[in-house]
């Protein structure tokens, strides 16, 4: 039975930006429908319109029916009686969605009292039950805790408890796991499925992550520029995508198995408002024909429940013809002969405790990290938030004496550098930050941004304009963009400018701090291609920091896995991903949602999710730091267990003769 | 594409008014029929006439000429104080923000010390020894920079942590260049608005001091002394009072319009919120 029915929904933001342009969506009870799209696709506007939470000034047209009752056009007071009872929501950021001044138990009890009219005591008891249900340890005590006392994952559990409190018929979850680490994301997705099973609610899961959809959704709706591009059962859409956009999107996803690498979709998603062209994807579509310019494509059925809004579905019968696979990258010679450009030994960085915390202990952000990067090679540094990976980068970039340990850049020990040597060394060491919008000065034109490093290092004034043009060309940008400000560029173009700036002085080592994390999937693929192409042409060495294991798999030659300030495993990408030796690496790999629904069934047999949260770096445990979350620890024999509790495991080769190291007592040597 | 700057009309109105007042104050004496030094023994407290457009005072001096002279003092004091105090605030705030450590603590201690001093008393006590009018400039400026300096420091601290500032540093850009290129431009809107506010504040302070007898001493004239002179006779000889108070109000209004307009034009974020 269809619980939530959206018909011909239009949302227009002031002054006149259409965000959703005629959308149909039907969700049955007990069904999870994933709504995916890139920025500007209208997915958030859809969620807000369904919930009746659009900002004032937004115009909305069409129909949203919940169990047959129209929601659009109702007053806020009427909607408030529906929201929280029949229609529940889970937002992206649970910290801002929970009131910081009240204990979480009270907040859950409040919705129960409001909507179900329960007594204070009954509501409290129910709140504790719900917290227990969503897997919060020691629920009676946790109910009295405030939101800031919980970790991100625990807060999201509280949000889900609140959402299911009144047995809703539909739940709208807007990017519920985007702010979470992969291991926690896996827990929350499992919980969302459990919530569906328990309440039989219809769930609309809005996300940009195709992996998340493949993991939990039954059906998927792909949005593009405010319209449905394709929809259908997850298996059909993922196995046989028919809309060129979906084909390109799925193809451009980096994969954990490192397989196939089709050409990325050119261009960027249109900004909100979208082009007036009949088919919004036409400018980026490789198989478009004259039929595409006539009228907006109506969705046509191409399978059971599988609809595609394409004027020429026949052209997409063979997906590999739409975006042909890119020629395989030439295999690179092994790196062990080349000289190291960066060597970090026993690096330590502790931050003094915050003054606001009495009796605080220092935060041991980096606590003995050893790694090496050779010329022309990419080292991927992966780990969850707070594991210290960005701190490692910043310590290298400082080019100064570290608290402990030693950093050698291009053969020079940073502790012994003079100011002028340090300045000279900066030419060879560059950085690209995560968010290009914040790393480019909004008041400088692209031309000035690219000229800055040249001027700083006294390149002849006359040579600068030529070099700027060269750099723009190098990163695939039009020369005309030189006169723009960063604010007038798309996010992909901005990141290209940031990369061009880093390459201006022909560095030999580039540190990349999550360079694609803030980009849309289709743009992500382009930037990764660009980075690899530049590496091959210029012989660059990269340190690629990321939380995304699939991205690292695609970019790196060697990978180092960080946990709580230390590297737990390190080695060639193929070896580490193929046969991870450390249980944490194993768990991380298992937790990554694979954009392939058929992997779901195979996965169920595996020990999937890691318990607990990423650790607090100011309170390290004795012995192995991973022990409290280690899935292997309980099954170990007593002697090994004792070692795990007492000795910090050293990084030792997993197999003698290879360069795969793991810091785990369990690994047989 | 025409981009409508918010607050554009206010900026224009303020700028036009201020220019007109400036022209009047500095070029007016060339046109006015009577100059300020001379005394007309034929007209004491005469109402406006062809010879004396705004009438004369009790001692037979031309009100128009006196007013123009007072306006010159006020405008000069206002501008100089604004440039001085805002410039000093920017220098102190940015130095404190960029250097940090003991320099930061020392400079902010100085600012806090001046903040807790009863500034009006201090100015009133020191003013007579500095002479009136332009002599007051450094004194007034010395008590106007502290809050701005604190704001500049706070903004510098946050700008200093931005990725583009870090990126510039890691490129090897020197600290002075970072400040000039990446920090100062982002403080510009704050500083311009602050300067505009300081102009009116300084003019009002100077007039207030003069009114109370701490500012310009005869034969110097300021709008404040004119108001003080005209005060007692205001009900009977209103042109005396209006001639002194009117320009004061107009100057402050013009400067405030200009400042507000500039702020909205330079800082779209604020305009959108209002």
Image: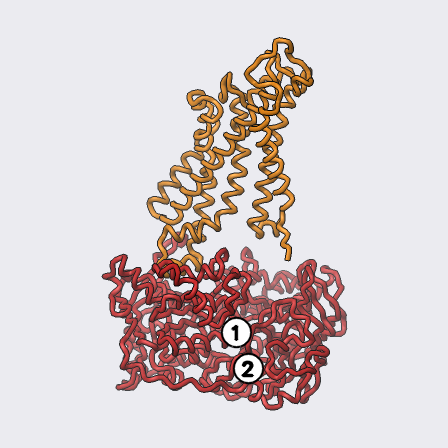
Chain colours: A red, B orange
Could you say which disc has been placed on residue A250 in the image?
Answer: 2
Residue at (45%, 53%) from the top-left corner? B159
Of residues B207 and B96, the one drawn nearer to the viewer in this rendering: B207
Q: Which of marks 1 and 2 is nearer the N terminus?
A: 2
Estimate the x, y position of residue A561 in percent, counting from the top left: 37, 75
Estimate the x, y position of residue B15 in percent, counting from the top left: 60, 39
Could you say which disc has been placed on residue A523 in the image?
Answer: 1
Q: In which quarter of the image is the N terminus of chain B?
A: bottom right
Residue at (66%, 89%) from the top-left corner? A314
Q: Is residue B68 left or right of residue A168?
A: left
Estimate the x, y position of residue A615 in percent, counting from the top left: 40, 68
Viewer-nearest of labels 1 and 2? 1
* For residue A395, above or below residue A646: above
- Measured Cα–Cα span from mark 1 to mark 2: 13 Å
Q: How many marks?
A: 2
Could you say which disc has been placed on residue B130 in the image?
Answer: none
């Amino acid at each position: 039975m269809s619980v939530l029915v959206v018909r011909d929904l239009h949302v227009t933001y002031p002054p006149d930006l259409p965000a959703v342009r005629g959308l149909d969506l039907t969700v049955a009870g007990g069904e999870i429908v994933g709504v995916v799209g890139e920025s500007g696709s209208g997915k958030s506007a859809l969620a807000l319109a369904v919930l009746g939470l659009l900002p004032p000034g937004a115009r909305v047209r069409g129909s949203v029916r919940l169990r047959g009752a129209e929601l659009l056009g109702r007053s806020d007071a009427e909607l408030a009686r529906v929201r929280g009872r029949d229609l529940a929501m889970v937002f992206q950021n649970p910290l801002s969605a929970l009131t910081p001044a009240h204990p979480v138990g009270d907040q859950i009890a409040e919705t129960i009292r409001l909507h179900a009219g329960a007594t204070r005591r009954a509501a409290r008891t129910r709140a504790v039950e719900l917290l227990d249900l969503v897997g919060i340890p020691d629920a009676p005590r946790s109910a009295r805790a405030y939101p800031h006392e919980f970790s991100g994952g625990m807060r999201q559990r509280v949000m889900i408890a609140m959402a299911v409190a009144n047995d809703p018929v539909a739940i709208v979850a807007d990017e519920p796991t985007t702010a979470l680490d992969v291991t926690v994301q896996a827990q929350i997705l499992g919980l969302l499925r459990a919530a569906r099973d328990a309440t039989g609610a219809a769930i609309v899961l809005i996300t940009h992550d195709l992996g998340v959809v493949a993991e939990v959704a039954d059906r998927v709706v792909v949005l593009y520029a405010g319209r449905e591009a394709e929809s259908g059962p997850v298996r059909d859409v993922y196995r046989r995508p028919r809309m060129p956009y979906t084909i390109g999107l799925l193809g451009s996803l980096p994969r954990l198995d490192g397989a196939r690498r089709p050409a990325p979709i050119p261009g960027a998603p249109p900004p909100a408002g979208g082009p007036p062209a009949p088919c919004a994807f036409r400018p980026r579509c490789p198989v478009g024909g004259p039929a595409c310019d006539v009228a907006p494509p109506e969705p046509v059925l191409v399978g059971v429940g599988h609809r595609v809004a394409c004027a020429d579905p026949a052209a997409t019968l063979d997906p590999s013809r739409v975006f042909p696979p890119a020629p395989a990258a030439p295999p690179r010679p092994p790196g062990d002969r080349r000289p190291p450009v960066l060597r970090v030994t026993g690096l330590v960085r502790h931050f003094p405790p915050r003054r606001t915390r009495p009796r605080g202990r220092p935060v041991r952000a980096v606590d003995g990290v050893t790694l090496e990067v050779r010329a022309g090679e990419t080292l991927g540094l992966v780990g969850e938030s707070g594991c210290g990976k960005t701190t490692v980068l910043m310590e290298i970039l400082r080019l100064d004496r570290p608290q402990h340990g030693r950093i050698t850049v291009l053969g020079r020990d940073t502790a012994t550098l003079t100011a002028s040597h340090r300045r000279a060394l900066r030419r060879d060491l560059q950085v690209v930050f995560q968010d290009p919008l914040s790393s480019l000065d909004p008041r400088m034109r692209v031309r000035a941004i690219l000229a800055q490093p040249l001027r700083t290092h006294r390149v002849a004034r006359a040579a600068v304009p030529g070099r700027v043009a060269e750099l723009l060309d190098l990163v695939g940008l039009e020369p005309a963009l030189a006169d723009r400000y960063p604010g007038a560029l798309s996010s992909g173009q901005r990141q290209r400018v940031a990369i061009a700036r880093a390459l201006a002085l022909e560095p030999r080592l580039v540190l990349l701090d999550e360079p694609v994390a803030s980009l849309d999937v289709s743009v992500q693929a382009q930037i990764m291609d660009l980075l690899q192409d530049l590496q091959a042409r210029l012989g660059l060495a990269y340190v690629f920091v990321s939380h995304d294991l699939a991205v690292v798999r695609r970019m790196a030659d060697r990978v180092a896995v960080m946990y709580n300030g230390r590297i737990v495993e390190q080695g060639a990408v193929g070896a580490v991903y193929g046969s991870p030796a450390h249980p944490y690496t194993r768990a991380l790999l298992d937790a990554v949602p694979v954009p392939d629904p058929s992997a779901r069934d195979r996965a169920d047999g595996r020990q999937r999710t890691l318990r607990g949260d990423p650790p607090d770096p100011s309170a390290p445990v004795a012995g192995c730091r991973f022990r409290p979350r280690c899935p292997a620890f309980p099954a170990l024999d007593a002697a090994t267990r004792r070692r795990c509790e007492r000795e910090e495991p050293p990084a030792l080769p997993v197999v003698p003769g290879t360069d795969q190291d793991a810091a785990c007592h369990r690994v047989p040597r | 594409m025409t981009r409508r700057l918010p607050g554009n009309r206010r900026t224009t109105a303020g700028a036009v008014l201020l220019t007109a007042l400036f022209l009047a104050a500095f070029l007016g004496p060339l046109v006015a029929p009577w100059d300020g030094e001379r005394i007309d023994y034929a007209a004491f407290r005469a109402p406006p006439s062809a010879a004396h457009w705004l009438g004369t005072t009790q001692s037979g001096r031309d009100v128009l000429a006196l007013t123009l002279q007072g306006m010159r003092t006020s405008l000069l004091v206002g501008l100089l104080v604004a440039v001085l105090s805002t410039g000093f605030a920017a220098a102190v705030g940015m130095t404190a923000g960029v250097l940090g450590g003991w320099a930061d603590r020392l400079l902010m201690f100085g600012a806090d010390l001046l903040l807790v001093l009863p500034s009006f008393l201090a100015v009133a006590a020191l003013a007579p020894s500095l002479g009136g009018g332009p002599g007051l400039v450094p004194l007034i400026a010395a008590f106007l920079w502290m809050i701005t300096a604190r704001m500049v420091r706070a903004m510098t601290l946050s700008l200093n942590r931005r990725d583009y500032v870090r990126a510039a540093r890691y490129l090897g850009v020197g600290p002075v260049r970072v400040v000039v290129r990446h920090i100062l431009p982002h403080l510009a809107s704050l500083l311009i608005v602050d300067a505009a506010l300081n102009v009116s504040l300084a003019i009002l302070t100077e007039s207030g001091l003069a009114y109370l007898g701490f500012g310009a001493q005869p034969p110097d004239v300021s709008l404040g002394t004119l108001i003080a002179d005209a005060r007692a006779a205001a009900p009977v000889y209103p042109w005396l009072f209006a001639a002194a108070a009117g320009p004061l109000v107009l100057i402050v209004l013009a400067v405030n319009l200009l400042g507000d307009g500039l702020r909205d034009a330079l800082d779209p974020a604020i305009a959108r919120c209002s």
